[in-house]
Amino acid sequence: MMMNLPEKVSICEVGLRDGLQNEKVIPSTDDKVELLKACIDAGYSVIEVGSFMHPKKVPQMADTDEVIKRIGNVEGVELRALIPNVRGVQRAIDCGCKKVKLNVSASRMHNLKNLNRTPEESVAGFTDCVDLAKKNNIAISGSISMPFASPWEGRTPIEDVDAIIEAYLKVGIDEISLSDASGQAVPNQVYDLCTHVREKYTQASWWLHFHNTRGAAMANILAAMQAGMTQFDTSFGGLGGCPFVPGAAGNISSEDVINMLDEMNIQTGVDVLKVMAISRKVSELLGHGLDSYVLRAGRSKDLIASQTE
């Protein structure tokens, strides 16, 4: 019997950022705004709209500022964006974005590839970002990529993860995401690390971000829930993949996760049918299929209903 599962979890839709950032076909700003409106209508209370990375480095995210300007503030919905540095905070100020997220990798090689900085250099820049954000009433969170393992160094020592967590806490960031960008995490490791950080850093709020590169993301979410975690990133249609990780596949599909939680009577507040409609629209815009089991097979309850009609 499974024990200690939550009654409710929060889902952040990251398809507009992590989902689209590696696509060759770039949806128009109008299309992104419509997708964002659809995500809000589906019931998401947290949405990662894009990133303020350099447009030449990630051209798919070049219009994040405009998307946020067009949608404005939405009551009850947190719209956040990924930032690399102080310039990212300033772009958030200029376009009216009220939540930003820093990132550092527990893998030295990944951090160099992603941000062109060592983890220590990234940490050194956190204070200025936090100060500028707080002066302008912008909330700020942090993310740790590769806290479980990396393609370059293998399993990540827990001491390396602790050091980054403590750096975030030192500069006043206490909402932290653990991001399995390479999709190497496995459930027992997830359970152990989640249990460790929850017990050691009780002042922090945690998000989990799993890629489904090797098919373990759903099991990892279950393991994280059993360890007491209740906040997860997912991407419509399973779209995405870090452009700086070799062989990286997409995130775990939003509709697959929400459907599973629905079947387990765990509340998300998100309408899975509307998310499935979003994924179909995204597939149409990008011109290729998406990695979503529920999108292909439908919900179990729909199959059962069709047999009783």
Image (cartoon, rainbow, N blue to C red):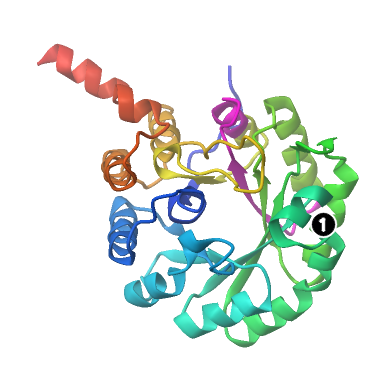
Position of 249 with respect to 303 (left or right) is: right
Query: Is residue 49 something that shows in the picture?
Result: no
Percent x, y of residue 13: 45, 51
Which kind of residue does numbered mark 1 sit on? Ile
In the image shown, does 271 or 151 lie closer to the viewer? Answer: 151
Count every numbered label the image shows and give the total.
Answer: 1
Position of 44 with respect to 193 (left or right) is: left
Query: Is residue 37 something that shows in the picture?
Result: yes
35 lies above or below 64: above
The N terminus lies in quadrant: top right
Q: Which residues are magenta?
A: 201-222
Percent x, y of residue 299: 30, 25
Give yes or no for residue 99 being in the magenta stretch.
no
Give yes or no for residue 217 being in the magenta stretch.
yes
Position of 270 with respect to 160 (left or right) is: left
Question: In the rendered image, which quarter is residue 186 located in?
Answer: top right
Q: Residue at x 76, y 72 (%)?
A: 126
Residue located farthest toward the right when viewing the structure as drawn: 159
Q: Residue at x 54, y 29 (%)?
A: 218
Question: Could you classify mark 1 by the number of other residues whose Cα lies within 10 Å: few (under 14), some (14-19), or many (20 or more)?
Answer: many
Q: Residue at x 35, y 28 (%)?
A: 294
Which residue has dot 1 on it? 164
The local secondary structure at tag 1 comes to helix
